[in-house]
Amino acid sequence: MVIDENNIQRLIEENKNVKKEEILRIIRKSLEFRPLEIAEAAALLNCEDESLISEIKTAAKIVKEKIYGRRMVLFAPLYLSNYCINNCAYCGFKQSNKDIARKTLSFEEIAEETLKILKSGHKRILLVAGEDLKKCSVDYIVKAIETVYKVDYKGNKIRRVNVNLAPLEHDDLVKIKNAGIGTYQLFHEVFHRETYKKLHPSGPKKDYDKRISIFDKCYQAGIDDVGIGVLYGLYDYKFETLALLTQAKYLDDKYKIGPHTISIPRLEPAAGCDFNQNTGYGVADEDFKKVVAVLRLAVPYTGIILSTREKPALRDELIELGVSQLSAGSKTEPGGYSKPQQATGQFVVSDERSLDEIISALANKGFLPSFCTSCYRSLRTGESFMALSKTGHIHEFCDINGLLTFYEYLIDFASPETKEAGMLLIEKLKPELLSAEQIQKFDAFVKKFKAGDRDLYV
Ligand code: SAM
Ligand code: SF4
């Protein structure tokens, strides 16, 4: 795929100072859950009128609530290796960082990390690694995925492994697909070609075109669940957001399956990366909120993932505006969960709350923390997932499965305070979200949970 930079720049220029009536028309369109044109997203991103921005945010909250309800999916990253042969100017793992502590986890250590993550209550793991096939080969990654899936803690297992890995070739993509991955995530980092070239001076990642064509290769290899993203803070946020939407539209048009998720990391300080302190393109919190709201309106059926790079108060606001998945209790160094401080982390984590603290905060705000992985395991992925999602039928699965996985979390892992708040929330949400028939099913499953069964879903 090709990003037409002149066209994006033209759309930004042409959609400045758009009349109030036109902004309101775009907002009304988004409230019908119709994806926006790139030009329409440009008009919203350019909007500076406080009262209209507030209308954009209100619309984003409505769309979020209608499509995702109060559910918030949670996951933990597991860093396999911080060896890397690239030199991304912004990343602590870059090869030129000679004095950081490097490590590739052994399979025993991967199992230990998984056990720690399982013991905190997570059911989803995102495997992350630097790019270095000598230290972290595809066969190693396949075995790592198998290792994660095998670990058992009192009947609890990781139910979905997603990956965030450098671009792989067809046969290797097939291998990791067969190992049972959920989503293949890859962030383009910065779509502006000249900036990309400057920030990726050496290593395989310097090949912009190879990186941007990874999802074509994924679909060809049978991976129909992909996650796109951009690293905010490297170039103009309006340009980058429109380029990201162009990538989403390209995939949707060509394969009839848009990306499953969009990730929106914002640049954090990292070891040996003075560049990060002043890139000239830092995104202010208010602009970042607008970006999330516009993404929510532009691609209503695509999940938005926010990581622990952001501080708790801002994360709380962003989940109202459109974020649907959160990482929680994260460590960004290999071995960070079981043997902290043996290796250097990728960047500074800003939300250091434990999973239980995050769950408690979510529950107190009326959000339903969900560990559901049932779509992927019931083969509701790619086109069949989108069909359910776009017709609103996905709620029939998500709400009950979200409640069931939250119940499991509460009985197995929650602190007494979280358990109390969570059980009250479940009782409140049950009649709001479930039909009479579903309530019967939920209550029957709860009886089975009490008898020791686990992992029950519809
Ligand atoms: N090495 C692979 C790659 O670069 O695609 C995959 C893993 S990389 C560790 C995951 C992501 O971390 C990158 O795609 C980048 O967006 C993000 N990242 C790197 N440095 C960062 C920083 N200083 N602050 C925030 N995110 C960062
Ligand atoms: Fe390596 Fe990825 Fe970090 Fe770049 S972002 S240095 S490729 S780990």
Image (tube, helix red, strand yellow):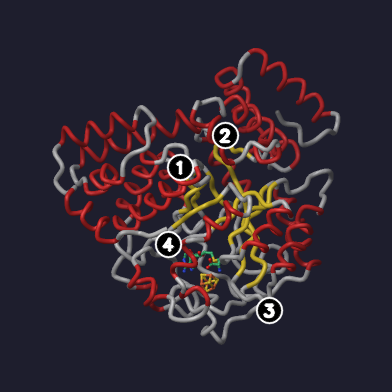
Compared across the picture, whether 97 is left or right of 52 comes to right
- Is the shortest distance between ligand 2 and the CB of mark 3 under 8 Å? no
- Residue 231 bears which disc, if any? 4
In the foreground, 376 or 307: 376
Q: CA distance from mark 3 to mark 2?
A: 42 Å
Residue 206 screen position, x and y as percent: 46, 75
Q: Amino acid at mark 1?
A: Ile
Residue 280 screen position, x and y as percent: 29, 70
Of badges 4 and 2, the one in the foreground is: 4
Residue corresponding to mark 1: 319
Residue 120 screen position, x and y as percent: 70, 50
Compared across the picture, whether 345 is left or right of 334 comes to left
Of badges 3 and 4, the one in the foreground is: 3
Q: Residues within 10 Å of mark 1 (few under 14, many from 20)?
A: many
Residue corresponding to mark 3: 134
Q: Earlier in the sequence, mark 4 or mark 2?
A: 4
Q: Amino acid at mark 3?
A: Lys
Of badges 3 and 1, the one in the foreground is: 3
Q: Earlier in the sequence, mark 3 or mark 4?
A: 3
Compared across the picture, whether 92 is left or right of 438 comes to left
Q: Amino acid at mark 2?
A: Leu
Q: CA distance from mark 1 to mark 2?
A: 12 Å
Q: CA distance from mark 3 to mark 4?
A: 26 Å
Q: Secondary structure at mark 1?
A: helix
Q: Which residue is rendered at x = 73% and y = 58% of the image?
A: 145
Which of the 4 image quadrants contains residue 445?
top right
- Residue 368 bears which disc, if any? 2
Residue 15 screen position, x and y as percent: 19, 47
Compared across the picture, whether 242 is left or right of 150 comes to left
